[in-house]
Image (spheres, rainbow, N blue to C red):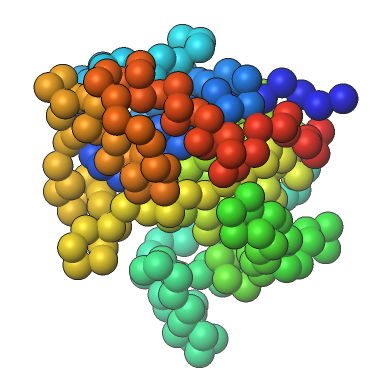
Amino acid sequence: MTALYRGRFAPSPTGPLHAGSMVAALASWLDARAHGGRWLVRIEDVDLPRCVPGIDRIILGQLADCGLQPDEPPVWQSTRGAHYQSALDRLVAGGVAYPCGCTRADIAEALARSGQAKHRHGELVYPGTCRGGLHGKPPRAVRLRTDLPSVECPLRWSDRRSGAQAQDVAAQVGDFVLRRADGLWAYQLAVVVDDDAQGITDVVRGEDLADNTPRQILLQRLLGVPTPRYLHVPLVRDARGEKLSKQTGAEAVDTVRRPLQALQAAGAALGLHLPAASSPSEWLGPAVQAWAARWGASAPETAR
Ligand code: GLU
């Protein structure tokens, strides 16, 4: 039995959609439509200090301008703390997550002492200091143990575009944070709990997030929830080859005055070559067909 396709677009409301996030929105919508599935929108506003009030509504408006309408009411992660807490409680009770009392300075010091100051994307790979207890320190963050014998190492997964992938999560990422020292929920936990709660069968998102996927699969396995299929689409880069991002000031797409152009640019970035159209709705139909020809439209095989 294959589950009905359910996909999602999960923007963080830190700024309006730009050319790069439009690509992720369009790719996820096209894949859902090509599979005759449902497409949901989830506002990922867990990192409240980075969220800008009102941007969620602007993003939903931009999607609507382009004819990308969610099939169910959007979900805001800021309303879902109790669900993250109950997943965290299960992980702690199962002995796979633990409180950590280390500050950044403690971590840097422990790594320097062991002579292995490992960095990953500017983050220190946590050396596991508090796995055995807090040593009198007050608890700060909660971390997931990645050194468990039950954890596949390296963790293997498959991307629909890039094929077979593997990551040694313990060595390359280390015990990662589930709840931050400031009390906020970490993206990794929130995304796994919500993809499961929303019955997501297929995650389609930008390539910059591919590196997070093994952590998410690990959490899915430890929580006993299904692993969706993953498709990471190429990133839109600026003239200097950098990923477009809100942090580097990427311009918002003007979907009010130029919705068709916004779609056409996103379609071109996805390698779709389409006939001329005079409106978003006229463009989207052939785009679904072109997407289906490129990425397939068979019902997803599930690992459920
Ligand atoms: N909220 C994340 C972002 O805007 C995307 C999360 C995801 O698609 O898994 O980068």
Residue 258 image position (x, y, % from top left):
16, 26
User: Can residue 39 be seen?
Assistant: yes
Residue 268 image position (x, y, % from top left):
34, 45
Vertical comparison of 287 with 23: above or below: above
Q: Residue at x 71, y 40 (%)?
A: 227
Residue 269 image position (x, y, % from top left):
35, 48
Residue 213 image position (x, y, % from top left):
59, 51
Vertical comparison of 124 with 101: above or below: below
Q: Residue at x 58, y 18 (%)?
A: 38
Q: Residue at x 22, y 32 (%)?
A: 261
User: Can residue 187 be seen?
Assistant: no
Residue found at the far right of this picture: 1
Q: Residue at x 18, y 63 (%)?
A: 239
Q: Give the quadrant of residue 52.
A: top left
Which quadrant of the figure contains the C terminus? top right
Residue found at the far front of this picture: 275
Question: Nearest the camera: 180 or 269?
Answer: 269
Q: How many marks?
A: 0
Q: Give the quadrant of residue 68.
A: top left
Which quadrant of the figure contains the N terminus? top right
Determine whether, in the image, residue 164 is placed left or right of residue 68. Answer: right
Vertical comparison of 258 with 23: above or below: above
